[in-house]
Image (cartoon, grey):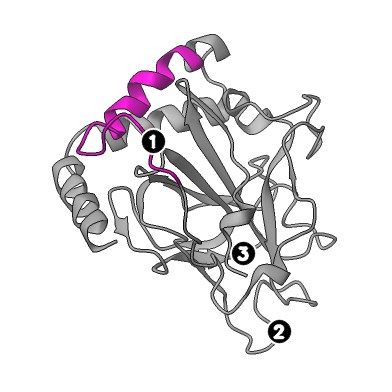
């Protein structure tokens, strides 16, 4: 892990003032908001993603053979919503059946797990101590982009969110409904470092009917396409 983090740190230094993060952030927002035709966005993905993967990591992902750190401080596998990973369904008011990264904010499906905190009064804080709950990097990550502002009434489903890359596995991670986003593009995080706090931001997550949770989606890049990855087996028991 130390060697891997050193590689991530070197990559961060070489990219910090370069274009790959800027290109990803612009591209990710274009996909989210569908400001370009879907076919065009899909065609551009290999170049944008390839620029992120270009430093020291090689073309082939390593096998994922060890558990991750649990992504919410003070919580465990029992807090994960049952049956959450359903990428092929209608979901969230979308008229689209199934998840496709290139559908952006209009996507269907639920290719993720919701991880719930103890918050009966829906104030976004842990009922045990009244504090915000930290979101942790489950494995070594490079932060790619973030959305750190959101207001009620926005149609943005993820609210405040963060995208990160686990280049050793060719995984893209999306942390949504955050209250605060602490990390910035270019940051390298070791497993268990804090990247933000759980919140209630997002079109549906703000509603009182919605329990407070982290929405954590993981995509694996296969044949130059990001596809849903079921990471449940990697969460520590």
Contact between marks 2 and 3 (CB within 8 A): the answer is no
Residue 57 covered by magenta stretch: yes
- Viewer-closest of 170 and 207: 170
Q: Residue 68's spot in the image, x, y percent? A: 49, 61
Residue 167 numbered mark, or none: none
- Viewer-closest of 48 and 120: 48
> Residue 110, relative to residue 227: is it above or below?
below
| Residue at x 59%, y 50% (from the top left corner) | 231
Q: Which quarter of the rendering shows the C terminus?
A: bottom right
> For mark 2, what is the residue?
127
The residues tagged by marks 1 and 3 sit, at their Cα atoms, a distance apart of: 22 Å
Q: Residue 221's spot in the image, x, y percent? A: 47, 30
Q: Exactly how many numbered labels are in the figure?
A: 3
Name of the residue lying farthest toward the bottom: 129
Residue 232 relative to residue 1: left or right? right
| Residue at x 27%, y 28% (from the top left corner) | 51
Instruction: Please tell me whether mark 3 sits on a helix, a strand or a loop.
Output: loop
Q: Earlier in the sequence, mark 1 or mark 2?
A: 1
Q: Earlier in the sequence, mark 1 or mark 3?
A: 1
> For mark 3, what is the residue?
199
The residues tagged by marks 2 and 3 sit, at their Cα atoms, a distance apart of: 14 Å
Stretch of the chain drawn in magenta = 42-63
Instruction: Please tell me whether mark 1 sits on a helix, a strand or a loop.
Output: helix
Residue 25 numbered mark, or none: 1
Q: Counting other residues with Cα less than 10 Å from the Cα at mark 1, is it few (<14), some (14-19), or many (20 or more)?
A: some
> Residue 156, relative to residue 142: is it above or below?
above
Contact between marks 1 and 2 (CB within 8 A): the answer is no
Quadrant in which residue 128 is drawn: bottom right
The residues tagged by marks 1 and 2 sit, at their Cα atoms, a distance apart of: 35 Å
Q: Counting other residues with Cα less than 10 Å from the Cα at mark 3, is it few (<14), some (14-19), or many (20 or more)?
A: many
| Residue at x 47%, y 53% (from the top left corner) | 65
């Amino acid at each position: 892990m130390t060697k891997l983090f050193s590689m991530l740190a070197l990559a961060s230094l070489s990219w910090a003032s370069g274009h790959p993060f800027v290109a990803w952030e612009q591209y990710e927002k274009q996909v989210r908001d569908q400001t370009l035709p879907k076919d065009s966005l899909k065609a551009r993905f290999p170049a944008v993603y390839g620029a992120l993967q270009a430093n020291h990591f090689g073309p082939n992902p390593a096998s994922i053979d060890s558990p991750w750190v649990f992504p919410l401080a003070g919580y465990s596998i029992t807090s994960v919503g049952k049956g959450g990973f359903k990428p092929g369904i209608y979901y969230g008011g979308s008229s689209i059946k199934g998840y496709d990264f290139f559908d952006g904010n209009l996507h269907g499906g639920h290719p993720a797990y919701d991880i719930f905190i103890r918050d009966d009064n829906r104030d976004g804080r842990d009922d045990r101590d009244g504090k915000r709950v930290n979101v942790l990097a489950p494995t070594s990550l490079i932060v790619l982009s973030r959305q750190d502002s959101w207001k009620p009434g926005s149609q943005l489903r993820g609210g405040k969110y963060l995208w990160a890359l686990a280049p050793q596995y060719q995984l893209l991670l999306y942390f949504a409904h955050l209250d605060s986003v602490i990390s910035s593009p270019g940051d390298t995080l070791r497993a268990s470092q804090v990247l933000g706090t759980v919140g209630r931001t997002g079109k549906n997550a703000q509603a009182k009917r919605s329990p407070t949770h982290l929405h954590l989606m993981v995509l694996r890049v296969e044949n130059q396409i990001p596809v849903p990855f079921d990471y449940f087996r990697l969460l520590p028991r």
